[in-house]
Image (cartoon, rainbow, N blue to C red):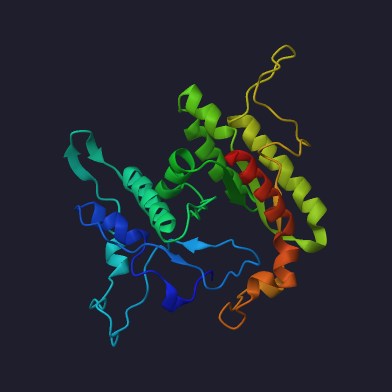
Amino acid sequence: MLQNTIALPKHGLVDYLVESAVGNQAGLELVSRSEVIKSPGNGEVWLLPADGAPIRPHATDEWSPAKRDYLAKLNRVYTEIPGGPDGPKTLADRLEEALAEAERQVAERSRKPDVTLLDSRAGIHDIAAIAITRLSGFSFLFATDNPHTWTGYRALFEQWRQLTNDRLNNLRQRLRMVAAMVPDSAAERYLSGFRDNAQQCFADTLYDEMSPTDVDAFNFGPEDEQAPHAPLPILFHAGLVGLNHLAAPDWYSSHLIREAYDQFVTTATELIVEEST
């Protein structure tokens, strides 16, 4: 939705992860500047997609491989490189290298990025774990208020409790819940229930137990708006279901988008800027 298909880079993240496992990652074109998002100033949006541009069988340029085999490549993403002087190169290592290479390419073609956003799949998954624990400065945890959500996050948080104290303290101080698909007609009631369930989940796992004299404990009350469990809302709107971005190239500036995402984007931007300064 952030880039015209024909303007995607020739390669994507999956290409880098696969090729770096065999030492063939040099020269991959990983990024392209968005032709969809237009900034009124000198801001730019650059993208590193999961996959590169689609095949153009009749392309006249030198890049016209027979097929991309994206699904086949996905099966090889988790391959570990055999041990070297520093031991095996894991998926986490290659993800970190891919991100650094993408940022280097943007800096080379334009300027160093001010902010890098990682859109990772949610839930208990290797990619999400790496994105949060190794790559990110601040993490937004998206959720809907249902028992499955809190069961999943509780299991994830319990796993994080096995980290060293320093790593756990660093991680839990840069988390924030996001309440997705909040019903507009009952937003206040929905967010109240979401906040209560999120606070209970954090209290049972990531928050410290408090005593009257422990003023430095990492713990927040249910109504604390600055707490990690305090939800940033994204409102549900039926008009956004099945949004055809090709038919509406200026979709990102529509009033429906602003109404649904305004509070989230405003607060998230403040948190990201605060984290990076």
Q: Position of residue 113 (x, y in %)?
A: 50, 52
What is the quadrant of residue 24 in the picture?
bottom left
Q: Is residue 36 above or below residue 119?
A: below
The foreground one among 273 and 198 is: 273
What is the quadrant of residue 234 in the picture?
bottom right
Q: Is residue 141 visible?
A: yes
Q: Tag count in the figure?
A: 0
The foreground one among 84 and 70 is: 84
Q: In percent of the image, x 34 and y 60: which residue is there?
A: 14
Q: In percent of the image, x 49 and y 76: which residue is there?
A: 4
| Quadrant in which the C terminus is drawn | top right
The foreground one among 202 and 102 is: 102
Q: Is residue 76 visible?
A: no
The foreground one among 120 and 162 is: 120
| Quadrant in which the N terminus is drawn | bottom right
Q: Position of residue 255 (x, y in %)?
A: 75, 71
Q: Is residue 180 above or below residue 55?
A: above
Instruction: Judge left or right: residue 41 versus residue 34.
Output: right
Residue ranking furthest to the top: 213
Q: In percent of the image, x 36 and y 49: which residue is there?
A: 95
Q: Position of residue 156 (x, y in %)?
A: 50, 39
Residue ranking furthest to the bottom: 58
Q: Position of residue 194 (x, y in %)?
A: 71, 47
